[in-house]
Amino acid sequence: MSGATICMSYGEDRANLTYQGAMDVMGFDDIDPKVFEEARHIHLSSLFMQSALLRDVDKVLQAAEAHGVTVSLDTQWDPVEKWALDYKSVLPKVTGPSSRPSPAPLR
């Protein structure tokens, strides 16, 4: 089952309520390899709520790099506040969309 998040905003405050569903168990082996062949950019988000993807983040980054796919990352908050990510290894591999030539502007 897919995960779902409800975002609640009240004035300047906000809160998110998430049901993880399959989010916590989906890892690199669950990603169709065609994604890396067909995508131009991959955005990783909420890694701390996805333990299998967090475990496999290096595999995802390696596959993206091998196929010339740019990667952006928004870790979001770590609900257990351990922040268990090897930032020194991961951040240099986050290439962002700006490192790739921009397509011709629409006219």
Image (tube, rainbow, N blue to C red):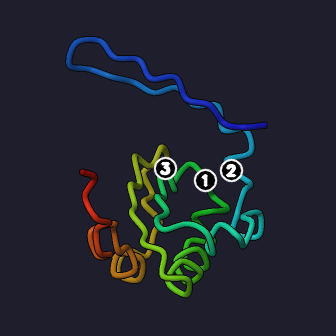
In the rendered structure, find residue 46 and report the number of the disc placed on it.
3
Q: State the image quarter where residue 96 is shown.
A: bottom left
Outermost bottom residue? 66
Give the secondary structure at mark 2.
Answer: helix
Which sits earlier in the primary sequence, circle 3 or circle 2? 2
Give the secondary structure at mark 1.
Answer: loop
Which sits earlier in the primary sequence, circle 2 or circle 1? 2
Tag 1 near tag 3, CB within 8 Å? yes
Give the secondary structure at mark 3.
Answer: loop
Residue 38 point in image, percent of width and height: 61, 69
Q: State the image quarter where residue 59 is shown.
A: bottom right
Q: Residue at x 33, y 66 (%)?
A: 97
Q: Residue at x 40, y 80 (%)?
A: 93
Check disc 3 and give the amino acid type.
Ser
How busy is the neighbourhood of tag 1: few (under 14 within 10 Å), some, or many (20 plus)?
some
Residue placed most toward the observer, 106 or 79: 106
Residue 60 point in image, percent of width and height: 58, 74
In the rendered structure, find residue 50 and report the number of the disc placed on it.
1
